[in-house]
Amino acid sequence: MTIVGSSASTQYGALSITCTVAGANLTMQDLFISAGHPASQYYDSNNGSYCYNILNFTGTGNTLTIEGSNVLEAVANGAVIHVAANAALAIGGDGTLYLYKTGAWTAIGGNGSETNGEITINGGVLNLIANARGAAIGVGAGDSGGGSTLPSSTGNVYVTGGTININVDWAGAAIGNAGSSNTPNQGNISGNLIVTGGSIRTFIDENVYSLWGLGSRGVNDVGITATKTDDGNSLVYQCVIPDAASYNEVYVDGALFYAGDLHAYKYINEELEQSSQYDITDTTQNWVPGSDTNLYLYLTGEYHMLTVNGVDYDCIWDNGAFELIEI
């Protein structure tokens, strides 16, 4: 099924899409939904409360294809895109998706204290904000919706491609676990982030860097609380590709790892403390053109041969960091 909106600036409010059977294939094109519909609510035993979502998937084998420019935003009552513990969703396409959530809920994942199901990102451009306590991708806080039980795991998230840009603005992780009122990683639980492609940029902003144990704002994957591995369960680490082009093709050890643009946008409030932040009334207003010319790959801690836009590099792992040397 394909749902075509008017544009990313024309809002549809109180709209929920519930896929009642497994294996749903949903395409969004130029669609802006500003809130889910309360009439779609259901009882979630994990939270002991009623929840409703903008997108709610059932079972496994589900796909969400992104075309054009799309916005999904929700402020309460459940994950924006719900992937329950017994569900699975693969996201792809060549469009852009802006996601906004608030409170103790997630943008993509479980409701509140519910462990998320398998989430796979194969393509597209995703711009998300991990504000308040819920993770951007993963699980929400244990007491969201009135519940009190922490999930046992954040579930698994797979990234095989795409351009993922997540700003961390409070205790909720970019990918992984929710936070408590003033501490990240509530209950110290962890699932896995399995990376075999794509570029993942996580920015810890001015409002919250000290909460995450950092000395200043900036790109830092401390905001990913999930354990980062490849598909062979070997740990992976951030490899920065500097001075990339507007469009890039990156091969790692002879295999295409990333094909896409730079992370073109930044969070408008990334340099501001909460008391000084701009008052945003529209999700797309959160994102303004940025100047980051880096790509952020995740590779195993060993030597790799990289080809970036036709130029070969030795990618050397030394003292916990990668160094690129042009051949």
Image (spheres, helix red, strand yellow):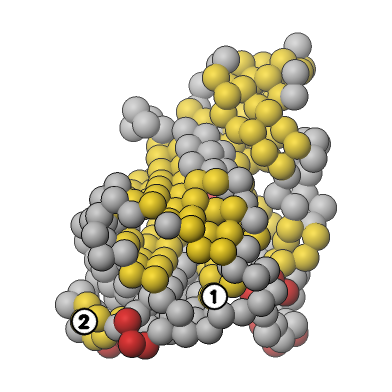
Quadrant of the image containing the C terminus: top right
Q: Going 29% across and 50% down the picture, which residue do you hit?
A: 23
Query: What is the x, y in percent for residue 82?
Result: 36, 66
Amino acid beneath label 2: Tyr
Looking at the rendered image, the quarter that the N terminus falls into is: bottom left
Q: Which of 6 and 275 is in front in this view?
A: 6
Question: What residue occupies the far left of the structure in this picture?
Answer: 45
Identify which residue, 28 or 321, lies in the foreground.
Answer: 28
Which residue matches tag 1? Answer: 33
Q: Position of residue 22 (x, y in %)?
A: 25, 55
Q: Which amino acid does label 1 sit on?
A: Ile
> Who's the residue at 53% across and 39% down the image?
161
Q: Where is residue 277 in the image (x, y as percent from the top left)?
A: 72, 82
Check disc 2 and report the residue beneath it. Answer: 43
Query: Which label is found at residue 215?
Result: none
Mark 2: which secondary structure? strand
| Residue 301 x, y percent position in the rendering | 50, 27
- Callout 2: few (<14), some (14-19), or many (20+) C-alpha neighbours within 10 Å? few
Query: Considering only order in the chain, which callout, 1 or 2, is on the residue closer to the N terminus?
Result: 1
Whether residues under marks 2 and 1 lie with C-beta atoms below 8 angstroms apart, the answer is no
**Distance in Å between CA atoms under marks 2 and 1:** 23 Å
Q: Is there any visible trace of residue 141 in the rendered image?
A: no
To which quarter of the image does residue 214 belong?
bottom right
**Residue at figure coordinates x 53%, y 84% from the top left:** 13
Q: In this view, does 252 lie above or below 160?
A: above
